[in-house]
Amino acid sequence: MKKTSGILLVLCLYTFYYVSLVCAGAYDIKELTPVVKEALDGRKARNDQMQSLKDKGIVGENNKGYVQLLVEGQGGKGLVNAENHDRKVIYEAIVEQNNLDAEAIKAVEKVFAQERRDRAKPGEKIQEEAGNWITK
Amino acid sequence: MLIRRDCLSILFLSLFLGGCASATVTAVGDPERPITINAYITIDIKGLKDTADNIEDYVSGDESIKSVKGE
């Protein structure tokens, strides 16, 4: 009886541990600070222009979670800088608000890079994880 | 008989405690060599992906800003 209850207790502890790991999931932006909101709204406002540049092949999504100017002299440098600045603000907010280590920003960037690759439309230039640029 | 047994117990206990008290732990190592600790941080990639999904949905105009906070 004592042995069974001991085993049951250990099983319960293990279950609780793994369930808590699974539910611990989301690294949301928990607080929409003015800086973060400005970055999000900036990206939203600029989205159509960025899409236009991507459609023309002037800009592409690199494997670090940022946009990259692929063709010089066609304009778009200011937009690219502003977009990357806003993305950086968002990534840093995720790390800071979820008490992640400073090194975790690399993981955040990689995840967002993959997300952008998945969302890229046919014809857009994307950089694969290995580093080579392809047209989707 | 009982007294003898008690004396023996006390004797053994004293020897044991004396042995513990006299035992020393010596750390052997080079004090000038830096100690490296490798810490592996586990990040829930699925959770990050959900967050990325919500944010990109908002940026592309598909969702409200509440979705960014996971609401």
Image (cartoon, rainbow, N blue to C red):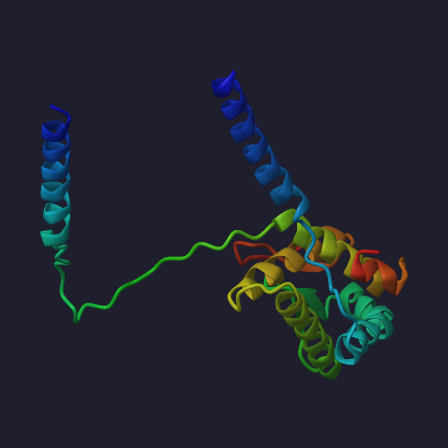
In the displayed structure, would residue A82 be above or below residue B12? below
Location of the N terminus of chain B by quadrant is top left
> Would you say A49 lies left or right of A96 here?
right
Give the residue drawn at x 75%, y 80%: A35
Out of A111 and A34, give the one closest to the viewer. A34
Quarter of image, res A134: bottom right
Give the residue drawn at x 81%, y 75%: A37
> Would you say A9 lies left or right of A87 here?
left
- Place of residue A98 in the rendered image (x, y in percent of width and height, measured from the top left): 64, 63
Quarter of image, res A60: bottom right
- Place of residue A108 in the rendered image (x, y in percent of width and height, measured from the top left): 61, 61
In the displayed structure, would residue A35 be above or below residue A121? below
- Place of residue A84 in the rendered image (x, y in percent of width and height, measured from the top left): 68, 75
- Place of residue B6 in the rendered image (x, y in percent of width and height, measured from the top left): 15, 32
Quarter of image, res B16: top left
Residue A120 in view (yes/no): no
